[in-house]
Image (tube, rainbow, N blue to C red):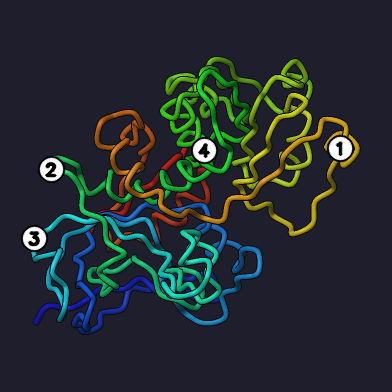
């Protein structure tokens, strides 16, 4: 009898694969056979530190929220999906009824259920039953790995939307991890002209240059020449130091978009500079209405997701994959786990 492998992460930072029965989809749901999962930086935070922001690992749960797969079965009332459809899972499942949902900002729904936010189980499994309207069909020829990259690409699309990018503008992108490199490409795809990228790891700066960065710099003195350079600044490093420095890169009247989640909840900011420049400072909380563009841009090559995948692991080696991603941060951009 077929089983559902599920990778559980516990509060002692251990990952254990358990075998459970395959779930059945309820009304309005679809059962997805997961084919590829990306390891997110937030997954590594939970693995290494047991928490991220206000979310804490207190009991075993299944991480993962970057997934592509194939519909295996549909529940009652599902008409627009059928077995065999290749799909991407949007992991933030809103109520659909509150004022935020009804106004289109469903990522702010107070009752959102986000797969892999402890204690909610995520996508590191063989089969997942999920509300069918949170699945997006993949175009023909798009790989499951690219499907798994749609979720982080949606973060980048939402960041560009929140930054109100205009044709011909200049951006500064702080951090050249997966989200920074995707934001770089989304900025260019949305009409941005010039992008400068700042990161402390040389290999990531080189990758940014390969993906369209017009200039790169190390944080600190090397980046001083980039003061006041950007119409819009994207903080994607998830770093308190990068967040504190973000205002310096913006031109007067510019915008700063907080995409990353710093390692601590309170950060010192240059409020005087913020006021003097009359900056707009906006936040990114995951995404809303961003998956269609993310999937389209990955499919047509405007976003080169294939250049971000540096390592691949089999599902049975998922614990090794997490440890490797933690221990080799300078060389891992995106690790993919394949079922």
Q: Do the residues labelled 2 and 3 touch (CB within 8 Å)?
A: no
Mark 4–mark 2 Cα distance, whole angstroms, equals 26 Å
Q: What element carries label 3?
A: loop
User: Who comes first in sequence, dot 2 or dot 3?
Assistant: 3
The x, y position of residue 209, in whole percent, is 49, 19
Mark 2 = which residue?
Answer: 140
Mark 2–mark 1 Cα distance, whole angstroms, equals 49 Å
Taking the spot 12% from the left edge, 58% from the top edge, the residue there is 85
- Residue 274 vertical position relative to residue 131 in the rendered view, above or below: above
Mark 3 = which residue?
Answer: 84
Q: Quadrant of the N terminus?
A: bottom left
User: Who comes first in sequence, dot 4 or dot 3?
Assistant: 3
Q: Do the residues labelled 2 and 1 touch (CB within 8 Å)?
A: no
User: Who comes first in sequence, dot 2 or dot 1?
Assistant: 2
Q: Is mark 2 on a helix, strand or loop?
A: loop
Q: Is mark 1 on a helix, strand or loop?
A: helix
Disc number lying in front (1 or 3) = 1
Disc number lying in front (4 or 3) = 4
Mark 1 = which residue?
Answer: 275
User: Who comes first in sequence, dot 4 or dot 2?
Assistant: 2
Of 4 and 261, the residue lying toward us: 261
Taking the spot 86% from the left edge, 39% from the top edge, the residue there is 270
- Residue 162 vertical position relative to residue 51 in the rendered view, above or below: above
């Amino acid at each position: 009898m077929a089983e559902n492998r599920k990778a559980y992460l516990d509060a002692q930072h251990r990952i254990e694969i358990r075998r459970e029965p395959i779930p059945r989809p309820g009304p309005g749901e679809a059962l997805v056979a997961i084919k590829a999962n990306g390891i997110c930086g937030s997954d590594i935070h939970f693995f290494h530190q047991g928490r991220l922001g206000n979310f804490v690992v207190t009991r075993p749960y299944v991480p993962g929220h970057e997934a592509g797969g194939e519909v295996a079965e549909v529940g009652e009332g599902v008409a627009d999906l059928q077995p065999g459809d290749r799909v991407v899972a949007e992991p933030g499942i809103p109520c659909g009824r509150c004022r935020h949902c009804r106004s289109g900002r469903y990522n702010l729904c107070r009752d959102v259920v986000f797969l892999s936010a402890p204690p909610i189980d995520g996508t590191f499994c063989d089969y997942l039953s999920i509300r069918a309207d949170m699945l997006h069909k993949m175009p023909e020829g798009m790989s499951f790995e690219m499907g798994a990259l749609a979720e982080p690409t949606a973060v980048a699309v939402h960041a560009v939307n929140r930054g109100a990018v205009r044709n011909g503008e200049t951006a500064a992108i702080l951090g050249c991890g997966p989200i920074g490199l995707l934001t770089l490409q989304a900025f260019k795809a949305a009409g941005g002209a010039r992008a400068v990228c700042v990161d402390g790891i040389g290999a990531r700066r080189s990758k940014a240059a390969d993906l369209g960065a017009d200039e790169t710099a190390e944080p600190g003195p090397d980046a001083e020449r980039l003061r006041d350079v950007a119409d819009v600044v994207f903080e994607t490093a998830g770093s308190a130091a990068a967040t504190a420095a973000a205002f310096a890169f913006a031109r007067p009247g510019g915008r700063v978009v907080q995409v990353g989640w710093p390692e601590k909840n309170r950060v010192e900011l240059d409020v005087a500079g913020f006021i003097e420049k009359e900056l707009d400072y906006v936040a990114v909380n995951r995404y809303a209405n961003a998956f269609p563009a993310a999937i389209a841009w990955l499919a047509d090559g405007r976003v080169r997701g294939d250049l971000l995948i540096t390592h691949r692991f089999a599902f049975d080696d998922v614990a090794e994959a997490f440890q490797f991603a933690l221990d080799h941060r300078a060389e891992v951009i995106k690790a993919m786990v394949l079922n």
